[in-house]
Image (tube, grey):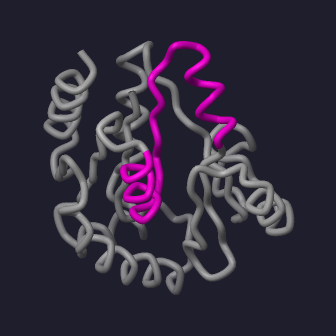
Amino acid sequence: MILIFSAPSGAGKSTLVNYLLSQRSDLEFSVSCTTRAPRGHEQHGCEYYFISNEEFLQRVRNDEFVEYENVYAGTYYGTLKSEIERIESKGHHVVFDVDVKGGINLKKYFGDNALSIFVAPPSVDELRKRLIGRATDSAEKIEERVAKAEVELLDQPKFDVTIVNDDLDKAKLQLIQTVSAFLD
């Protein structure tokens, strides 16, 4: 089975995914590819496979992705077929942490074998505060992410479940209950 997590940048999606992974040994994170530079302490092969635009586009030509997107101008993200095969060969359920377009595309691809979860911020203003608090992006990049988030929030109804991350403990509880109902 497949779990798909999507959210606007800064909604707390990765925090919830990491919590879920710490609670269930039958789940494994699918590492996506990206052409962006690592942020903070991110490492190749852990949070993402960091590759060049040229390598990414060659992999597209080789049909190595389940889905991919040009998320920000010149910055690609994608899900490798080999990553899914690697996880499934261990008998684990695949967990995706992807952008909103990627989440919609993965749900279309996997259908009823996937549960798509949209993590929503309590408000756009709170989202902006979280992005500023991260201190990983310039003010211009933060405003670009906020503008993108306002559009992404319109896609929320395309997901099976929405978890509003306004209280982290409540969001964690809702997440565990939702995933258990789908997998168990």
- 101 above or below 59? below
Indicate the position of residue 76 as horizontal and vertical percent values: 65, 67
Asked if residue 99 lies in the magenta stretch, the reply is yes
Q: Position of residue 141 (x, y in %)?
A: 53, 80
Quadrant location of the N terminus in the rendered image: top left
Residue 163, image x, y percentages: 19, 48
| Segment tinted magenta in the rendering | 81-109
Kindly identify the residue that appears in the image at 70 percent across and 56 percent down. Answer: 38
Pick the front one: 57 or 178: 57
Give the total number of marks visible in the rendering.
0
Residue 91 pos. (x, y %): 52, 13
Question: Is residue 140 shown above or below 163?
Answer: below
Q: Residue at x 46, y 46 (%)?
A: 97
Q: Is residue 51 visible?
A: no
Q: Does 19 appear in magenta?
A: no
Point 51% across, 25% down: residue: 28
Residue located 16% across and 26% down the image: 177
Q: Quadrant of the C terminus?
A: top left
The secondary structure that dominates the magenta segment is: helix
Rendered position, 181 above or below 80? above
